[in-house]
């Protein structure tokens, strides 16, 4: 059995001490910028350097999170950060942005690269593509089953890391746009506002409320032997937003389980049972194995359970003012509350959530008056998130065990990012980079087969007929199982000729490419090419390997996140000439990223119903409704197997959440043309639209007129920035 590394979160110096004290082999932590948990404490530069030095002396490892995308204007700061990290020599950096990987590999080759789960790698094809470009470890997407992980392991030598404990996202790893759509707080920028944890209300006649998209927390403690047997190299615990107590408790449980491996089934079973009892004190949500056994299992969702963490104490029964304190009466059940404990109160309408340290507890028969934050009232929910007794025991244990990892005086650690300029990166002109074809395959002439103008994207074969009515220069069709049946006439589904010829259709691949599809596409691609389909939009690194030895034109879709020139250069190295701007992008960044002479190779989405959540489950058995809204009366649609024609993705069983209000900048097309952009996408995939709606959008695009009741997404305001930069 391979040696397994236990990787723990360190969101603060206290959590770092607790994780190492409890037996973690490695920790991952973030600095002030460019990491996926910007709202946590993070570390000063001197603290990072001190931590790395101490951990190395202890035989432990330290990984630095640089797992967000960066804009072109931030290239200098990213370069400065990577230069600094190359000097203090962490054991690895965890990256999401292809631009970070490109910059590090070209200029700081001593840095070991770990692909973040946010990079959405879920297949051996994706793992091996990254391995060839300098990545030594891949943190796999969280939506995989055990057999998929086992299959990936059998087809790659790259180190594999998987999450075994902690909070989950409802959206497929790295593909959530919900928080960004609501206000520029992008999950891809470490600013997630946790839209999945909110309460929503259905728009049906029998309206109901619930936490429809708030998953339970992952807990894989009982599956540790099987994951180890599958060849996983590292087990990762989520939780850089959590307390030191959480880190200590969870790490100690998984340490116990890992150390029992190889000692016989009885010893391992006993250790796991003891570990499960320890984990009852992690003060988190209900637990789930997520997709470990089956993607059809929806037990990880319970709409009646709040999206908050902690042990539920119940609802506030009464409220009173006593001295300076506001107090709430709660039923005093099996979970007692003491002064010094920490609680979290959620308003019944889910608009406020606030943590509070209890200052007073007064018994009232079988109930108790406890101090609560002001402005909460009867019916609001109360959760216990930490006990004073537990915190005291843990801190005492750690203080006896060793000195803190980071010394109080860090004055000797003076290194910090400098003021260097990022080097210029040249992008190849159109036609200078092979598009996925080998030297033996004759490549199509890009400019001829991808003319300038308006492109119409649809998700179903039937929508091609509506798209034809607006006469786009080309159609973009989502390549799902329904589409393949028609295109290849697999089951005799083709009842009539398609409204577009094969060389007028671009086939768009789903961004989530799990191992379960490993044998599906390699068989389909040659047949599609023989049928004349030679243009493909790819949205996952794994897709590139599907087109080796085929003379095709590849377009990098919006989910490859080309937010900077370095990411664009990485994509071009994959053999891709054309790039679709990410849906989250803004005009200033788009123009900074691409020089005027390069802009004709960029597709700009100007209309779309962006997929805010992409979910690897068919939610229709759980949710029969389609439309819902939040407490701000923003309205959305849930697209499932029940309310769409055909499958949502090649593997079927996928659900999407889209806004009722589309993204539109069709009135900006004249200005974009002036700036040198020549190709624009009207994306009609998502909710079913009528032919009249297609024509309305096309007319507005041709006239440069604004569409009413539409969102600009981040086009004007850009990403939300805490630092105002």
Image (spheres, rainbow, N blue to C red):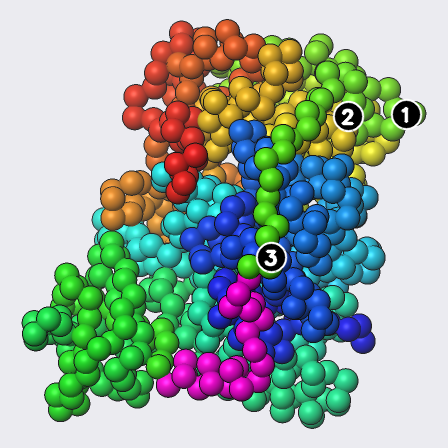
Q: Are marks 3 and 1 in contact (CB under 8 Å)?
A: no
| 3 vs 2, front mark | 3
Tell me the residue at 30%/55% (across/down): 199
Quadrant for the N terminus in the image: bottom right
Q: Is residue 28 above or below residue 691?
A: below
Say which residue label 1 marks. Answer: 439
> Is residue 392 inside the magenta stretch?
yes
Secondary structure type for disc 3: loop
Image quadrant where residue 208 sits: bottom left
Secondary structure type for disc 1: loop
Q: Classify mark 2: residues with Cα within 10 Å, few (<14), some (14-19) or many (20+).
A: many
Q: Earlier in the sequence, mark 3 or mark 1?
A: 3
Say which residue label 2 marks. Answer: 435
Say which residue label 3 marks. Answer: 413
Q: Is residue 47 visible?
A: no
Magenta region: which residues? 389-410
Instruction: Using the numbered discs, state the Cα–Cα distance from disc 1 to disc 2 in whole angstroms.
Output: 10 Å
In-image side of 109 versus 694 (left or right): right
Question: How many numbered marks, from 0 up?
Answer: 3
Tell me the residue at 34%/32% (across/down): 661
Q: Are marks 1 and 2 in contact (CB under 8 Å)?
A: no
Image quadrant where residue 643 sits: top left
Instruction: Using the numbered discs, state the Cα–Cα distance from disc 3 to disc 1 in whole angstroms.
Output: 51 Å
Tell me the residue at 20%/66% (across/down): 373
> Is residue 399 inside the magenta stretch?
yes
User: Where does the image place residue 463, in percent across and percent down from the top left?
Assistant: 51, 27
In-image side of 662 versus 482 (left or right): left
Q: Is residue 474 above or below residue 19?
A: above
Q: Is residue 25 visible?
A: yes
Secondary structure type for disc 2: loop
Quadrant for the C terminus in the image: top left
């Amino acid at each position: 059995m391979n040696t397994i590394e236990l990787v723990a979160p360190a969101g603060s110096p206290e959590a770092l001490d607790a994780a190492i004290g409890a037996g973690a082999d490695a920790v991952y932590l973030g600095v002030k910028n460019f990491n996926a948990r910007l709202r946590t404490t993070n570390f000063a530069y001197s603290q990072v350097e001190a931590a790395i030095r101490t951990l190395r002396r202890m035989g432990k490892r330290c990984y630095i999170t640089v797992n967000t995308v960066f804009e072109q204007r931030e290239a200098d700061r990213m370069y400065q950060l990577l230069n600094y990290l190359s000097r203090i020599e962490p054991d690895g950096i965890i990256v999401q942005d292809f631009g970070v990987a490109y910059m590090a590999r070209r200029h700081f080759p001593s840095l070991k690269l770990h692909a973040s789960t946010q990079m959405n790698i879920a297949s051996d094809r994706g793992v091996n593509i990254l391995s060839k470009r300098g990545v030594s470890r891949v943190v796999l997407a969280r939506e995989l089953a055990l057999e998929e992980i086992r299959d990936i392991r059998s087809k790659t030598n790259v180190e594999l890391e998987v999450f075994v404990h902690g909070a989950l996202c409802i959206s497929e790893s790295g593909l959530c746009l919900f928080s960004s759509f609501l206000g520029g707080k992008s999950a891809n920028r470490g600013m997630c506002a946790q839209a999945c944890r909110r309460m929503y209300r259905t728009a049906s006649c029998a309206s109901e409320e619930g936490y429809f998209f708030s998953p339970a927390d992952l807990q894989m403690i009982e599956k540790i032997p099987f994951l180890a047997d599958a060849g996983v190299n590292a087990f990762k615990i989520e939780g850089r937003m959590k307390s030191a107590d959480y880190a200590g408790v969870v790490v100690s449980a998984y340490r116990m389980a890992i150390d029992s491996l190889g000692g016989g089934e009885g010893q391992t079973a006993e250790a796991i049972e003891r570990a499960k009892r320890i984990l009852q004190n992690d003060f988190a949500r209900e637990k789930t194995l997520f997709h470990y056994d089956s993607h059809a299992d929806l037990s990880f969702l319970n709409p009646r359970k709040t999206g908050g963490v902690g042990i539920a104490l119940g609802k506030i029964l009464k409220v009173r003012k006593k001295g300076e304190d506001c107090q709430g009466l709660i039923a005093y059940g099996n979970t007692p509350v003491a002064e010094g404990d920490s609680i979290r109160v959620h308003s019944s309408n889910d608009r406020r959530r606030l943590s509070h340290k209890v200052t007073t507890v007064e018994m009232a028969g079988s109930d108790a008056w406890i101090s609560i934050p002001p402005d909460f009232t009867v019916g609001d929910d109360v959760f216990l998130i930490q006990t004073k007794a537990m915190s005291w025991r843990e801190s005492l244990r750690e203080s006896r065990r060793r000195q803190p990892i980071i010394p109080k005086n860090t004055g000797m650690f003076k290194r910090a990012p400098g003021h260097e300029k990022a080097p210029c990166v040249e992008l190849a002109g159109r036609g200078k980079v092979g598009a996925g074809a080998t030297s033996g395959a004759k490549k199509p002439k890009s400019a001829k087969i991808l003319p300038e103008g308006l492109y119409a994207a649809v998700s179903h074969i039937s929508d091609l007929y509506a798209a034809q009515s607006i006469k786009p220069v080309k159609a973009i069709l989502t390549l799902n199982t329904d589409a393949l049946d028609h295109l290849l006439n697999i089951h005799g589904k083709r009842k009539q000729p398609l409204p577009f010829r094969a060389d007028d259709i671009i086939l768009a691949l789903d961004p989530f490419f799990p191992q379960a599809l490993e044998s599906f596409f390699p068989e389909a691609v040659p047949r599609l090419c023989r049928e004349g389909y030679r243009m493909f939009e790819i949205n996952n690194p794994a897709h590139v390997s599907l087109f080796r030895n085929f003379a095709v034109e590849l377009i990098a879709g919006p989910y490859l996140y080309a937010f900077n020139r370095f990411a664009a250069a990485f994509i071009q190295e994959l053999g891709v000439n054309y790039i679709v701007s990410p849906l989250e992008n803004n005009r200033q960044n788009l123009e900074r990223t691409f020089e005027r002479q390069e802009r004709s190779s960029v597709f700009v989405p100007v209309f779309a119903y962006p997929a805010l959540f992409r979910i690897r489950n068919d939610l229709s058995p759980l949710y029969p409704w389609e439309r819902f809204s939040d407490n701000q009366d923003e309205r959305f649609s849930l697209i499932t197997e029940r309310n769409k024609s055909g499958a949502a993705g090649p593997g079927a069983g996928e659900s999407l959440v889209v806004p009722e209000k589309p993204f539109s900048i069709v009135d900006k097309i004249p200005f974009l043309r002036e700036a040198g952009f020549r190709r624009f996408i009207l994306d009609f995939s998502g909710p079913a639209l009528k032919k009249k709606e297609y024509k309305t959008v096309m007319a507005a695009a041709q006239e440069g007129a604004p569409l009413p009741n539409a969102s600009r997404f981040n086009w004007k305001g850009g990403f939300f920035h805490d630092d105002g930069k």
